[in-house]
């Protein structure tokens, strides 16, 4: 499909803006729309070197205009003044080879108010993430389409080849800093603030189950209203730093389970919920594209456990198994080009895995405006991804729950809420 205006050129890679499509729920491998990612290759997970970005300020125009990456979650590797109020910035990955998730985040301000243009340029990648801007670093909005220009449009509708090679944005800058970011900034500090806010409830507690490479805590949220219950679910999020939409859906999912509805109260009386909302705090705070500080994709380390983040979760689950917990559901929230579920096929799991497909179908029935994309796997070995490890080693039906990079934020919140409600109904009915 060809589009000729800026707005519709942008739509080529803003997949999730395709709302109000006809409903078609498919819980087989006959995917609709987004076909999902290919089978993950087996890769070593021993430490690999990374290039930690230099942090500081870039100063231009007789010390009147400033760019900075000197904050948690930033990624900015170089800036050039091209003249005529045009700047080029470079974004590079922490190491290579790497799945192309070209995260960026920087601030800009000036004592000489004016309009400028910034070109986003990447190392071995294309412009995957549509820019978000903020005046406080907390509240972000997508930049207006009139201030965005895609350069060298890609081909197709999904994947990095569909994204433009470069992008230019136009900003009105002044003495007040503007944050420009690939997605909303949810650093380890901000996530911990959210965790602590939930922990004010009497049935919610929080504690660390381990440390990252840089000694940041791996914080766990425990929702437990009945100390006698041994049925449990396990939720994790943000193994990959840029995958903020998955985190936002997970956040709504957990807030719904923690709510005061009768459904939530009944569910909590029969189930304990364990949540690790930020699996990769080092990668998030260092503005990584994909990896932890060991230079590894954590969602390839659920067999060898060479990285402290995955090993912390493995040790925790083994401990809970020894205490008599029965894990009845597991989910790992991620982000990709469009909303998609990656369950294990019931040919591999047997009847136990049917819960996941019943859950997916019930979500689709309540949200018919969004197509249901599903890609099931029959592979139980190796267990290098979380979903497979959860099932093979701890007997829990599990799914990788992916949300689109550009899925509308109100819909993310609604989908997280609906997903939680439908899971609670299904598990309570059993």
Image: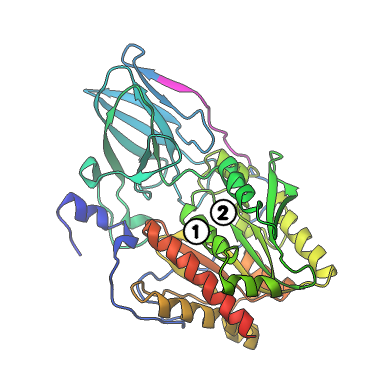
Q: Which mark is residue 246?
A: 1
Q: How many marks?
A: 2
From the viewer's perspective, tell me whether residue 233 is left or right of residue 138. Answer: right
Secondary structure beneath label 1: helix
Q: Residues within 10 Å of mark 1 (few under 14, many from 20)?
A: many
On the question of residue 46 being in view, the answer is: no
Q: Nearer the viewer, residue 204 or 176?
A: 204
Q: Position of residue 75 (x, y in %)?
A: 47, 36
Answer whether residue 137 is magenta in the image: no
Identity of the residue drawn at 45% across and 40% down: 138
Between 75 and 171, the one lying in front of the other is 171
Residue highlighted by disc 2 = 238
- Whether residue 57 appears in magenta in the rendering, the answer is yes
Q: Position of residue 42 (x, y in %)?
A: 61, 62
Secondary structure of the residue carrying tag 2 is loop
Q: Which one is nearer the viewer's eye here, 171 or 257?
A: 257
The 10 Å Cα crowd at callout 2, few under 14, some 14 to 19, many 20 or more, is many
Left or right of residue 321, residue 196 in this image: left
**Mark 1 and mark 2 in contact (Cβ < 8 Å)?**
yes
**Magenta part of the protein: which range?**
49-58
Determine the residue located farthest toward the top in the rendered image.
62
The disc at residue 123 is none
Q: Quadrant of the C terminus?
A: bottom right
* Residue at the farthest bottom position: 351
In this rendering, position of residue 325 left or right of residue 302: right
The chief SS type of the magenta part is loop
């Amino acid at each position: 499909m060809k589009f000729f205006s800026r707005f519709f050129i942008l739509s080529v890679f803003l997949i999730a803006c395709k709302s109000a499509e006809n409903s078609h729920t498919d819980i087989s491998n006959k995917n609709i729309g987004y076909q999902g990612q290919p089978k993950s290759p087996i890769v070593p997970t021993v430490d690999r070197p990374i290039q930690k970005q230099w942090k500081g300020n870039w100063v231009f125009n007789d010390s009147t205009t400033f760019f900075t990456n000197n904050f948690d979650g930033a990624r900015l590797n170089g800036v050039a003044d091209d003249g005529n109020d045009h700047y080029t910035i470079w974004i590079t990955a922490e190491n290579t080879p790497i799945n192309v998730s070209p995260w960026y985040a920087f601030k800009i301000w000036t004592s000489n108010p004016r309009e400028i243009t910034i070109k986003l340029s990447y190392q071995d990648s294309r412009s995957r993430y549509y820019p978000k801007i903020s005046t406080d670093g907390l509240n972000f909005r997508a930049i207006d389409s009139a201030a965005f220009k895609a350069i060298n449009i890609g081909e197709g509708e999904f994947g990095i080849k569909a994204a433009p090679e470069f992008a230019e944005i136009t900003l009105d800058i002044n003495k007040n800093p503007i944050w420009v970011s690939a997605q909303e900034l949810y650093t380890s500090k901000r996530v911990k603030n959210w965790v602590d806010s939930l922990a004010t409830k009497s049935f919610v507690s929080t504690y660390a189950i381990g440390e990252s490479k840089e000694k940041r805590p791996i914080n766990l949220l425990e929702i437990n209203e009945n100390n006698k219950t041994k049925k449990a679910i396990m939720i994790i999020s943000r193994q990959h730093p840029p995958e903020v939409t998955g985190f936002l859906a997970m956040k709504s999912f957990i807030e719904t389970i923690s709510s005061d509805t009768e459904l939530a109260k009944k569910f909590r009386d029969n189930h304990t919920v364990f949540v690790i909302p930020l699996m990769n705090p080092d990668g998030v705070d260092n503005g990584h594209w994909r990896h932890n500080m060991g230079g590894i994709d954590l969602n390839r380390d659920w067999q060898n456990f060479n990285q402290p983040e995955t090993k912390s979760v493995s040790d925790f689950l083994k401990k809970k198994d020894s205490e008599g917990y029965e894990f009845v559901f597991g989910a790992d929230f991620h982000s990709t080009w469009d909303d998609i579920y990656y369950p294990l096929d019931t040919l591999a799991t047997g009847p136990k895995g049917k819960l996941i497909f019943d859950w997916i179908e019930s979500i689709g029935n309540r949200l018919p405006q969004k197509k249901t994309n599903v890609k099931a796997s029959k592979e139980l070995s190796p267990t290098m991804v979380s979903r497979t490890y959860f099932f093979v080693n701890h007997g829990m039906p599990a799914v990788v729950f992916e949300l689109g990079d550009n899925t509308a934020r109100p819909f993310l919140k609604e989908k997280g809420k609906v997903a939680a409600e439908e899971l609670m109904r299904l598990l309570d009915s059993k």
